[in-house]
Image: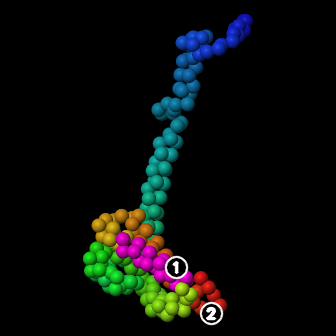
Amino acid sequence: MTAPKERSVKSLAELPAAIEPPRDLWPGIEARLKAQTPVAGTGSARAPTRLGQLRWLAAAAMVASVAVGVWIGRDLVPLSTPAASVAQLTAPQATPRQQAGAVDAAFVSDPRYARQRAELLQSLQARLDAMPQPARAKVTASLAAIETAKKDLESALGKDPSNALLQELLINTYQDEMRALTDVHEASDPGRGI
């Protein structure tokens, strides 16, 4: 058999539109496919059990996910009273309309959180007064931004209480507030700074 003569091609237009293979390739492809496909009644009963195992594994993973979600959210209880009962950092600035919008969305965790937050808020003003003016301005602005974010999230959750993203954002905002209050408490101790 002689090798085909090579020729130089300068453009795609010079190439032929179609080239027929020298032999029919389909019988070889068909044979490979038949060799890989299990025939009913042969020793390939493992495939359906594997699929069944994957289904059970997926169901178990879903049950575990729900259990973890319930375990994580066990301390969060929606308030059935107005949000006005939740201690507000800037209570004089809050209007009754803002408080009414957050009625259904306010969340409070276990009593330890409420107690620690109340203790930190009780000493907040004295600790702010002891800070230098630039630090006091930063802390006050941060706490005001956190308070605004909480009100906005509570209002949005009042409109869509089943929104998991809003719930997570609200919890993160509560955590941010506790971090800020704790930092103010620790920073005002003698020998420490912000």
* Residue pictured at 44% horizontal, 56% vertical: 59
Q: Secondary structure at mark 2?
A: loop
Query: Which quadrant is home to the C terminus?
Result: bottom right
Q: Most extreme residue toward the right, as rendered? A: 2
Which mark is in front, 2 or 1?
Answer: 1
For the point 27% across and 80% down, the residue is 96
Q: Which residues are magenta?
A: 134-152
Question: The residue under label 2 is which amino acid type?
Answer: Pro
Residue 118 in view, yes or no: yes
Which residue position holds label 2?
190
x then y, percent, for residue 76? 40, 76
Q: Amino acid at mark 1?
A: Lys
Viewer-proximal residue among 144 and 159: 144
Give the image quarter of residue 121. bottom left
Q: Give the answer, above or below, for where 24 lies relative to 146.
A: above
Position of residue 5 measured from the top left corner of the image (x, y, whole percent) = 71, 7
